[in-house]
Amino acid sequence: MNAQVQLLKVIRTLLPKETSLNDEISKILDISYDAAHRRISMKSKFSIEETVLLCNHFGISMDMLFSNQHKVLFSKTKEVQSLEDLTLYFKDSVSYIKEFKNTNATMYYSAKDIPLFYTIGGTLLSKFKLYVWLNLLIGKDNITPFESFQLTQQLQEYTSELQSIYNDLSIHEIWNDTTINSSIQQIFYFFESGLLNIDNALYLYEDVKNILKVLEDKCSKNTSQYHLYYNELLILNNSVLISKEEKKKLFLPYTMLGYFITDDAQTTTNASSYFLHQIKNSKSLNLSGTRDRKLFFNKAYQKIDYYIQKVNNHFSIEF
């Protein structure tokens, strides 16, 4: 279907029946009634600028107009090369998902790593993860110690706002036995490199434990707000789908923090089916018995205890 015809068709569905399409186009584009009529009757074409203006005004995804089953348009998150970039990354992240706040939306998260939302928001671990992301993405030769790292007020505000949106959603997360691995290995790596002191390393491991304890408690209560699934075979990738009745948005990772983002209807519908299929083939830690839930969490606690022992024994000398 012609893109202009498709755009007008979508706009008609969004307008009240008594509203004149001609009047709306004329008003939004600031053109005459006759000029609007010529566009609606296909005697003249929308310019690129007019198309963008109409899509922005009505909240229409341009994916719908210009993609086909083999091509999808994506936006992407801010590239991070400085602390300022990291601040803008979280500012943009808030803008991508704030439309789902207070909407009874559902988030599906394929947790290759501990979900970002648990590692932001005021704890020592949240500061450490920001420190890790910044240094690994910038790739500086001379990394300052963690204890010298300072967060800006703006960065803290954006991460807290992002976490508050997450807390308002119904959450479905798929984890496996390796989900916590990168975080606990990062702590030991920076400790062993002399960039993190022993006291903070031990505090960070306790923070990871506390995240797990909170999730274990949520699972045991089996509320509708939080669902955790265990899949020992699925390769997870940190992809995220947020869904409400009239809209879905998919986030696909391409770097450590970088995501491609689309709300293309067919793509997000397919992603939703995929997530639901994987959940069906996973073990619900909310609905499983106490034994299965304890086995999963105890295995994770044991991993953390192993690294705590490695930290405590690191400077011991055997003769």
Image (cartoon, grey):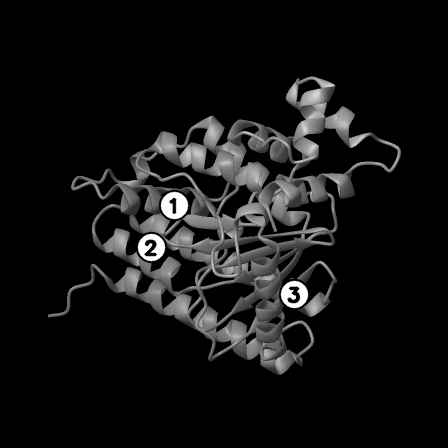
Residue 224 visible to the viewer: yes
Residue 150 visible to the viewer: no
Q: Is residue 306 left or right of residue 3?
A: left
Q: Quadrant of residue 224?
A: bottom right
Number of marks in picture: 3
Q: Mark 2 and mark 3 in contact? Answer it, CB < 8 Å.
A: no
In the picture of the structure, the residue carrying the numbered disc 2 is: 187
In the picture of the structure, the residue carrying the numbered disc 1 is: 128
Q: Earlier in the sequence, mark 2 or mark 1?
A: 1
Relative vertical location of residue 122 with respect to residue 236 in this rendering, above or below: above
The percent coordinates of residue 126 (x first, y second) are 45, 45
Residue under the image location 41 percent in, 52 percent down: 204
Q: Mark 2 and mark 1 in contact? Answer it, CB < 8 Å.
A: yes
Residue nearer the viewer, 288 or 207: 288
> What is the CA distance from the residue labelled 3 to the residue labelled 1?
27 Å
Residue nearer the viewer, 228 or 144: 228
Q: Quadrant of residue 86?
A: top left
- Residue type at numbered disc 3: His
Q: Earlier in the sequence, mark 2 or mark 3?
A: 2
Residue nearer the viewer, 269 or 256: 269
- Residue type at numbered disc 2: Ile
Residue furthest to the left in view is 319
Residue under the image location 65 percent in, 22 percent down: 29
Residue under the image location 30 percent in, 37 percent down: 81
> What is the CA distance from the residue labelled 2 to the residue labelled 3?
27 Å
In the picture of the structure, the residue carrying the numbered disc 3 is: 227
